[in-house]
Image: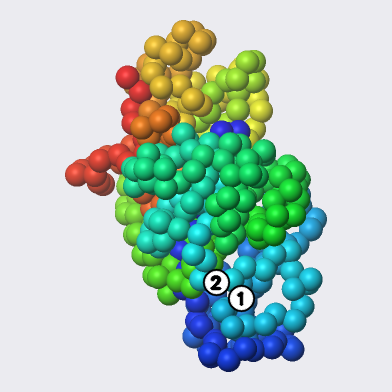
Amino acid sequence: MQKIYLLSGFLLLLGCKDNSQKTIENAEIISDISTTSLNEIKYAEGFKIEQHLGYKTITLTNAWPGAEETFTYALVEKGTDLTNPEDFNAVVQVPVKSIVVTSTTHIPSLEMLDVHTSLVGFPNTQYISSETTRKRIDNNEVIELGRNEDINTELLIDLSPDVVITFAVEGGNKTITTIQKTGIPVMYNSDWTETSPLGKAEWIKFFGALFNKETTANQLFEDIETAYFEARDLAKTAKKSPTVLSGAMYKDVWYLPQGNSWAAQFIEDANASYLWKDSQGTGSLSLHLEAVLEKGQQAEFWIGPGQFTSLQQMKDTHTVYEQFDAYASGEVYSFTTKKGATGGVLYYELAPNRPDLVLKDMIKILHPHLLPDYKLHFFSVLE
């Protein structure tokens, strides 16, 4: 996922049920205004939620970059008899009571919705930074399941979760078929493919739907949205827009965010001038050192210098870094120094869910006078 940076959600369901068995003969969407409002997706482009009689659907249109297949999942209320389960990629009874997720970006959503005790398993638990979930791991309440690409299915069957939430970076995840054969529903979550800060954060609504917590998810997201726009408006009051360099070299290639990327959007919203803001694309640019040195040598700030954790480490890797003004002035900031107890990077886990905090960090770095009492949450200056 580090490459994705050079390269994650909040909801509550409007129940439509009674105590008798229901048979759904029509997939007619309920048009109630309040239901429509609960399921509204404002910024995320990769999924949508629709309410039906006795169940709701989540449809993913971009499960991974370039995905041509659309995935549709039915979230069924207890007492509802779904007559066409074969039409869905997975059928899950809600509210979910036990869950396995596979990306650290899923953890904050569970905690913010106060359903984190439903988490029973996770692959690569060492990457989880959250103190709350780490305590549950230490107490054997969250079981280590191996790797996302090769989940220990024997352990998974023993856990028998209501659903497994996974992701795929390039095409289908080969573990999916194996898990599905056990009868455990599997759903993709592609929060990481979103390119706007608020689009990533809105995936809390994905989890809200699973736990019938749409109202809670909407309120949490609205609070984040409000805080983000307030921070952006504050940044606009700065009289100067400092120049910003990003990225670092890997072998002989310098990777940095493209102009339409998530990282570049934060810099723009913080009222700074990202030197490659005019480049097209949402991923990363691959440039020769000479091109970066020519354009970025005099940049005032350097934000996100790869995986480096100190200026000395940068110098030891390549002395050319010393030629950049931001390095010489000590204005190099990284998110890789703030980690959980077992080495997981906090930024990778929480930042997609809390873009308001990322933006405030940027403002504190670029316009410190605007937030005099604010302490950096994700970033720190490299010593």
Label 1: element kind = strand
Identity, as a three-letter code, of the amino acid under mark 1:
Val
Residue 190, horizontal then vertical, whole percent: 62, 53
Q: Is 270 or 8 nearer to us in this picture?
A: 8
Q: Is 237 or 86 nearer to us in this picture?
A: 86
- Dots 1, 2 in contact, CB < 8 A: yes
Q: Is residue 143 left or right of residue 65?
A: left
Residue identified by numbered label 1: 76
Is residue 243 visible to us here?
no
- Which residue is at 70% across, 87% downward? 24
Q: Quadrant of the N terminus?
A: top right
Is residue 381 visible to us here?
yes
- Which residue is at 25% across, 41% downward? 375
Q: Is residue 235 left or right of residue 33?
A: left
Q: Is 109 or 100 nearer to us in this picture?
A: 100
> Is 113 placed above or below 382 here?
below
Mark positioned earlier in the residue sequence (1 or 2)? 1
Q: Is residue 351 left or right of residue 172?
A: left
Q: Please tell me the numbered disc located at residue 367.
A: none
Residue identified by numbered label 2: 94
- CA gap between label 1 and label 2 equals 6 Å
> Is 208 placed above or below 254 here?
below
